[in-house]
Image: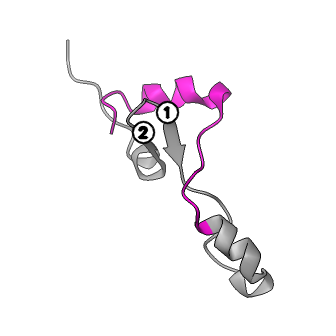
């Protein structure tokens, strides 16, 4: 069996936690931040965002080796 290739776009967007959950970064942190309040920006800094359960199986196929 040949090795499976990791999807490079998915590797940049998702990672796994120690328990196997799929972790993702939050949206709305790239530009147009002058329009947002300090509270909004502070809440977006938190890294506690996980991929939806319905998407998790597809993401795990794109990241076969737990990158």
Element under label 1?
loop
Label 1 neighbour load within 10 Å: few <14, some 14-19, many 20+: some
Name the one closer to the observer, 32 or 25. 25
Q: Are marks 1 and 2 in contact (CB under 8 Å)?
A: yes
Q: Quadrant of the C terminus?
A: top left
Magenta stretch: give its range. Answer: 45-67
Number of labelled discs?
2
Report the residue at 65% width, 66% height from top: 44
In the rendered view, tell whether residue 54 sits above or below residue 42: above
Residue 33 position, x and y percent, is: 70, 81
Q: Distance between the Cα atoms at labels 1 and 2?
A: 5 Å
Q: In the rendered view of the protein, which quadrant contains the N terminus?
A: top left
User: In this figure, which colouring scheme has been used for the structure?
Assistant: one colour
Q: Which residue is mark 2?
A: 17
- Residue 29 got which mark? none
Q: Nearer the viewer, residue 42 or 67?
A: 42
Q: Quadrant of residue 40?
A: bottom right
**Snapshot quadrant of residue 2:** top left
Q: Residue at x 58, y 62 (%)?
A: 46
Give the residue pinned by disc 1. Answer: 21
Could you tell me residue 52's position as x and y percent?
65, 34
**Residue 58, position as x, y percentages in the image:** 54, 26
Q: Residue at x 42, y 38 (%)?
A: 16
Q: Position of residue 9 (x, y in %)?
A: 44, 48
At 46% from the left and 28% from the top, the residue drawn is: 60
């Amino acid at each position: 069996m040949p090795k499976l290739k990791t999807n490079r776009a998915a590797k940049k967007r998702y990672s796994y936690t120690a328990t196997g959950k799929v972790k993702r970064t939050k949206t709305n942190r790239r530009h147009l931040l002058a329009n947002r309040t300090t509270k909004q920006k502070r809440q977006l800094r938190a890294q506690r965002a996980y991929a939806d359960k319905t998407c998790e199986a597809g993401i795990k196929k794109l990241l076969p080796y737990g990158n």
